[in-house]
Amino acid sequence: MKTSVDPITRSVIQHRLTAIVNEMGEAMLRTTYSQILNSSRDFSLAIVDTQNRLIAQADHIPVHVGALPWATLAVQESFGHVNPGDVFLLNDPYHGGSHLPDLTAFVPVFDGQKHLFWTVVRAHQSDIGGATHGGYNPHAREIYQEGLRIPPVKLYENGVCRDDLLNMIALNIRNSRDFRGDLSAMLGAVRLGEIRMQKLFSEFGSPIVLQAIEQILDASEVQARKAVSGWKDGVYFGEAFLDDDGFGRENIRIAAKVTKSGDSVEIDLTDSDEQVVSFLNSPFAAMQAAASVAFFFLIDSETPKNSGALRPLSIKARQGTIVWADEGRAVSMCTSHPSTEIMQAVMVAMAEACPDRVVAGWGKRFRIAIQGHNPKSGRNFIWHLFHARPGGGASSAGDGWHSGGEWTTVGGLRFASIELTEARYPLHFRQHEFEPGTGGDGRHRGGLGTHLELELLIDRSAVANTAGDGTRHAPPGILGGESGHPHRYLLKRSDGSEIALKTKDVGIDLAPGDILEIHSSGGGGWGRPSERPAEFIARDRKLGLQ
């Protein structure tokens, strides 16, 4: 017999679940060591039940969270029985992970002897071993060249840490001190989630909590189907392109066929191009996450983003393609590309079906990781460029966000304080500002990209690698909107020479006094430029945005 839960109690429990994952996120922010986590917030938190359903998530990195149910499934398939005090880790893309830098920690949540939930954190490590520093290897031809693969493993057993396993993992990571600190923060966050969930059980009783969650998931499904029902029925097609794979193959196509019928949607990616040599491939879980995030963007923003809201959606793909690579392929760029292109292709496809819901193209990821010696601290450092964010795409709601970032993170990734970065690292920000004219024109304009000039205050040679896309295929406009400008990244030597940086390169020598000059892309425009109100155009000119 089902336990009856009144609407007020259900609402209280729903908000408590959200508060728990948000508190887990605050614990991460306050305790992690690496700037990629404590400033740029490249992590996500969630509560997943033992049926591998996403129950609640914090608003961090959407493409992380969409893959977490596949990760808990991998843990449960590997460990049939778990105990209180156990802690599990994984990062392997072919065991529910996304890419190797994203380490995921799981704590089982019990009520007495009954295992009911998992509290989960996925956090991008500043290094994960492998052939190049920083977690991305543009020259990788297989996953073994990208870093340390961790299938589902038990790090703690009945509350006792397996130090041999922890030492083995840390030994394979370049900045093991920061890694150990970040991992401790992750474990603290999931333990905090476990404590808060058990407190919820003590207040309401687990039967009430479980039944409230069923109602929450059912209500989310109803809301999602209501949104879908308002779209025009039909079969729609969209496509998006990657610049290249770094090995000479160009204009790689991601194709989406979206069938909308009644209150259901099918996203079919089977016609996408074959898998590539390099790190641009996507594993199954990351592909599922990208398609799910695109769907979440299309439905009502107030609908809780959980497994209930995904019930109207089905996803099809073909193994051996760039969106679902064969096991062993390199995939470390997958959370940015082709995830961005999957989402973009879905948006293009749905422009006719629900024009008021689609979003123009956001800027693509173009990251630089620098490894060198810090004369301030006397220690080696690894620094990831999160500044100079590209512009966000416009929508029916208005202009795109300036420097909003990439589509897969939808503003969730942030750049660290410039002053704090300069204090921690041998870097000087000579210029960091919005770049006028980079956003695509339209009834609503794309967000502006950024102009950055970054001087290296190192005392000896350093090395950089790049990972990304978007110097050829710019963020597209939609419904008649114009595309934003593409990326343009330059390395200016102290001798006056200048090099255009490639999006996929390793072993770039950096010398003291070199300057990185970065012009990040602007977002795409929404609607025809001729429809932009005159007062908006006048405002753009006054603010210097054109």
Image (cartoon, rainbow, N blue to C red):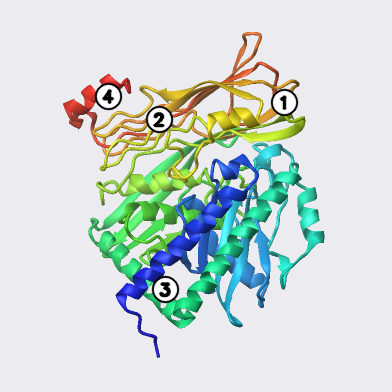
Q: What is the residue that sits farthest to the bottom in this orientation?
A: 1
* Distance (Cα) linking label 3 and label 2: 40 Å
Name the residue beneath numbered marker 2. 522
Q: Is residue 122 above or below residue 140?
A: below
Q: Residues within 10 Å of mark 4 (few under 14, many from 20)?
A: some
Q: Nearer the viewer, mark 1 or mark 3?
A: 3
Choose between 104 and 176: the one closer to the eye: 176
Which of the two discs, 4 and 3, labels the residue nearer the N terminus?
Answer: 3
* Distance (Cα) linking label 4 and label 1: 41 Å
Q: Is residue 104 above or below residue 176?
A: below
Asked if marks 3 and 2 touch (Cβ < 8 Å), the reply is no
* Distance (Cα) linking label 2 and label 4: 15 Å
Name the residue beneath numbered marker 4. 540
Name the residue beneath numbered marker 3. 213
Q: Amino acid at mark 2?
A: Gly
Quadrant, the N terminus:
bottom left
Q: Amino acid at mark 3?
A: Ile
Q: Residues within 10 Å of mark 1 (few under 14, many from 20)?
A: many
Secondary structure at numbered mark 4: helix
* Distance (Cα) linking label 4 and label 3: 47 Å
Q: Amino acid at mark 1?
A: Ala
The residue at 40%/70% (across/down) is 13
